[in-house]
Image (tube, rainbow, N blue to C red):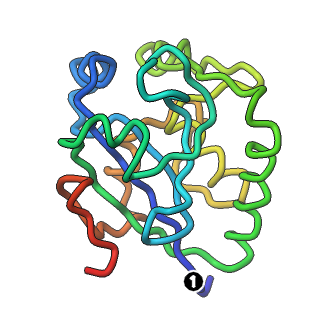
Amino acid sequence: MVADQSVFILLTNTGTFLTRVIKSYTRAPYNHASISFNRKLSELYSFGRKTPNNPLDGGFVKEDIKTGTYSRFPNTTCVIYELQVTDREVEKMKRVLHVFIRSRQKYMYNLLGLIGIALKEPVEFSNSYFCSQFVAEILQRSGIKIWNKLPALVTPDDFRQSGRFHLIYEGKLSEYDPQA
């Protein structure tokens, strides 16, 4: 495989109540995962809050590191990883992503899937994902095999623990400089 491009995985800790609850169980420093096709993270996708003020209204979201939920939590910490991929893999990922974009209204947040992770049993519903499940699904459907488990069992910390991703930044999200 000759890597032509990169995709970027953003893991975050906003410090919200839900994040603190998840962190108390996982003991992981970051409990939210997103995927971007550029280093600036201007095209950033995940499953999370649809509206910044309502943690219960979740689903497929296009995130923005300067506005929306992240602007409400200026002390958000993060780690950003780069994964080198081929042009063909990016093309496949974008095709999968566009299915989500076109049908964004029908997708829900897979809250029960989080319980499934705790029980080590995948809880899957059609059109329902949690953040790391979504990112893992995008990779898997594009032929990129990172783990020997279903996307419904992939956690944000699995990205951090994998040797396939190259660390490019760790610190406050608000201080991230894509030019550095």
Tag 1: Cα neighbours inside 10 Å, few (<14), some, or many (≥20)?
few
Judged left or right of residue 63, residue 4 is: right
Q: Which residue is mark 1?
A: 3
> The residue under label 1 is which amino acid type?
Ala
- The structure residue drawn at horizontal position 34% and vertical position 34%, both measured from the top left corner, is 31
- Frontmost residue, 84 versus 66: 66
Seen in the picture, residue 116 relative to 26 is either above or below; the reply is: above
Q: How many marks?
A: 1
Seen in the picture, residue 92 relative to 78 is either above or below; the reply is: below
Judged left or right of residue 4, residue 70 is: left
- Is disc 1 placed on a helix, strand or loop? loop
- The structure residue drawn at horizontal position 35% and vertical position 41%, both measured from the top left corner, is 70
- Frontmost residue, 73 versus 139: 73
- The structure residue drawn at horizontal position 61% and vertical position 36%, both measured from the top left corner, is 150
Q: Position of residue 170 (x, y in %)?
A: 21, 59
Q: Position of residue 154 (x, y in %)?
A: 49, 37
Q: Position of residue 23 (x, y in %)?
A: 25, 25
Q: Quadrant of the C terminus?
A: bottom left
Q: Position of residue 43 (x, y in %)?
A: 56, 60
- The structure residue drawn at horizontal position 62% and vertical position 82%, both measured from the top left corner, is 1
Judged left or right of residue 28, residue 127 is: right
